[in-house]
Image (spheres, grey):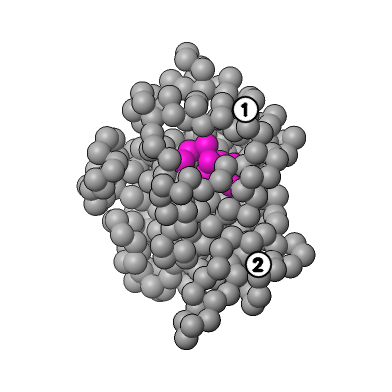
Amino acid sequence: MPAPERLPAPGVSDTGELEELLARGELTVVGRIREASNAVLLCTVAYGGRSADCVYKPVKGERPLWDFPDGNLAQREVAAYLVSEATGWGLVPPTVLRDGPYGEGMVQLWIGPGSDGDDGDDREDGSGGDESGGDDSDASGLLALVEGEEAGEGWKPVALADVGEGRTALLVHADDPRLRRLAILDAVINNGDRKGGHLLPAPDGRLYGIDHGVSFHREDKLRTLLWGWAGEPLTDEAREVLTALATRLADGEPLATRLAELITPVELAAVRARVADLLRTGVHPQPSGQWPAIPWPPV
């Protein structure tokens, strides 16, 4: 019997196929990522002669959060994927909610090195990477610390950072349209934890964001390293995407119906309000001052 065909990172034409593989395939646990704050299992999934690497986060392995008492983190991860797909930007790897070896959980396509080959041992013992793929170095070229108070051409300033021994450096991120789209998505879903390790550039040039469990809160919880465009006008593309997204979030629309199964009515109303506010102001949001603006640790 031939070995299953290993699928690459998703493209526009195969997203539905990958969703089916993740939802219906047989999950085999091959390791655990130990650094993750919740249970995160590295798996392979196989169905119909195809296979892929994926991450499985069972609901039973989640640590309760006082400010997210409703639903679970797995549902919020799926909701983030659905909103990402609705924008057409494809910023979140294919993600589904399904039953697995340890009960219901989130299953997401792994973006990064494969589980076979020289890097397999590192991943299986949990020594390589964040909760859904990659490691801190994956964001190289997107984030940096620079001396002085000027970001330099091609970079956007975020904040001054203490680098020890009484010294500071300027934290900057690339002035990259992929990051700018991700900043818009984070504003829409109210992402409370956009760290450097959650940015995964793929070999095909695409950029993915992962770990969206602490998103969709009804109150402003936006914490991110992508503040470089704060207060700047939205691009024409962003306004067009947000206008279309507002329509898809209307009562009775498929996206709104599916989100209502994953987040609370109040949280869904807050998503609509954030989209409306972005369109009304026409600018990237700024830190509210009522909540730490940058996640800790930042990577």
Please report the residue visible at 47 percent of the width from the left and 30 percent of the height from the top. Answer: 271
Question: Please, what is the three-letter code of the amino acid marked with disc 1?
Answer: Arg
Residue 181 position, x and y percent, is 63, 44
Give how far apart the Cα atoms at labels 1 and 2 are.
33 Å
Q: Mark 1 vs mark 2: give the one in front.
A: 1
What secondary structure is found at the residue carrying circle 1?
Answer: helix
Q: Is 147 part of what is drawn in magenta? A: no
Judging by the rendered image, the residue that carries numbered circle 2 is 141
Q: Nearer the viewer, residue 65 or 77?
A: 65
Other residues around mark 2 within 10 Å, as few (<14) / some (14–19) / many (≥20): few
Query: Which span is picked out in magenta?
Result: 183-194
Residue 215 placement, left or right of 63: right
Q: Nearer the viewer, residue 167 or 141?
A: 167
What secondary structure is found at the residue carrying circle 2?
Answer: loop
- Residue 274 visible in this rendered orientation of the protein: yes
Residue 296 placement, left or right of 9: left
Judging by the rendered image, the residue that carries numbered circle 1 is 280
**Looking at the image, which residue sits at the far right?**
153
Please report the residue visible at 38 percent of the width from the left and 55 percent of the height from the top. Answer: 43
Residue 87 position, x and y percent, is 61, 34
Q: Nearer the viewer, residue 114 or 142?
A: 142
Please report the residue visible at 47 percent of the width from the left and 53 percent of the height from the top. Answer: 293
Q: Mark 1 or 2 closer to N-term? A: 2
Residue 59 placement, left or right of 52: left
Question: Please, what is the three-letter code of the amino acid marked with disc 2?
Answer: Gly
